[in-house]
Amino acid sequence: MIFNKIKADKRNLYIILLFLLLIITIFFAIISGNSGLSPYTVLKVIIYKTTGISFSDISPRDMAIVWNMRMPRVLMAILAGTALATAGALYQGCFRNPLVEPFILGASSGASFGAALAIVFPALFLPIHISAFIFALLAVIAAYMLSRHKGEINSVGLVLSGVIIGSVFSALVSIMKYLSEDTQLREITFWMMGGLYHASWSDIYVNAVIIVICFILSWILSWKLNLISIGDEEAKSLGINPDKYKTIFIITATLMTAVCVSTVGIIAWVGLMMPHAARLLTGPDNRYVIPLASLGGAVYLLICDTIARTLTMGEIPIGIITSIIGAPFLIWILRAKSGRLFL
């Protein structure tokens, strides 16, 4: 009993420390750049915008940089990191596979096709982010329907269906690239590399509502994900309908992934890495894995975005940064702690 209490306290401490690290990272991300902002200036702008308390020494330039340019980008990085990491934890728990990630069911390919379609035919189709969101959902729905057999969903069949649907949409993206002009081809390619440069307050509002609701639902039901993770038969013996809750978790993870990808493009590795890193700290209990992974994803994506916009005079697509940093990190995790990565 005492050991379990100490272990729970240690897990809670990790959550608190990661949350404090996130706060520090937010301030570091806002002040980083060529504008020469100080932490005190940033704090004054945030206080003014959130409470209405005015400061005479805040310049319109500082106000515009902090609140209109960097704050939406920072918040979008937090939301996207939370969404991808939480979705990764849900998929890995449902499929009992540590190599599953948020794009396994074709969401990335569907979103890429939707974005490419909107770029190549701007007058005939929806805006890029709406088109990407719709086709990301359609891809996952198609994979889900394809895997249904006699009213039941097989996890292996669902993954294979996702691979098939993803391949189809990837081929359609190739067709869009072939039909596109040079400027359109560059825009498609750049969008598929991911980036937060278009983040706006309207994007924040839409993403925050969906992602926060999905995250809270995932956390509340995380104990059921623990039962699903030990196997369908064991879950049934404990009174849990695995197919029902797998469907709930898959829909929740897909919705988070789709709304995130439609705004920031394809950002790899976050949903694959962060659940693993969380399990190294807390073990396989998803009641702690989900919040730790979400906080880790937010911090990681915020750091990568800061590097992407400050490393050179231009801006590096964030998908390149996440891949360069993420691959060696995951290799290290696999080699150092392979026995503790999953159940």
Image: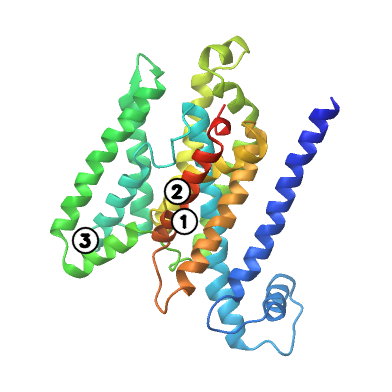
Residue under pointer 3: 120
Q: Helix or strand or loop: what does disc 3 sit on?
A: helix
Q: Helix or strand or loop: what does disc 1 sit on?
A: helix
Residue under pointer 1: 325
In the displayed structure, would residue 69 be above or below residue 291?
below
Residue drawn at the location 25% of the way across and 43% of the way down: 169
How far, Cα to Cα, is label 1 from label 3?
32 Å
How far, Cα to Cα, is label 1 from label 2?
9 Å
The crowding category of the residue bearing disc 3, from other C-alpha atoms within 10 Å (few below 14, some 14 to 19, many at least 20), is: many
Nearer the N terminus, badge 1 or badge 2? 2
In the displayed structure image, the side of residue 300 where residue 126 appears, left or right: left
Quarter of the image where one finds residue 189: bottom left
Residue drawn at the location 49% of the way across and 61% of the way down: 203
Label count reads: 3
Residue at the top extreme, as displayed: 237
Q: How is the image coloured?
A: rainbow
Residue at the left extreme, as displayed: 179
Looking at the picture, how far across and down is residue 138, in whole percent?
Answer: 33, 40
Quarter of the image where one finds residue 221: top right
User: Given the image, on which type of amino acid does mark 1 rest?
Assistant: Ile
Q: Helix or strand or loop: what does disc 2 sit on?
A: loop
Residue under pointer 2: 269
How far, Cα to Cα, is label 3 from label 2?
28 Å
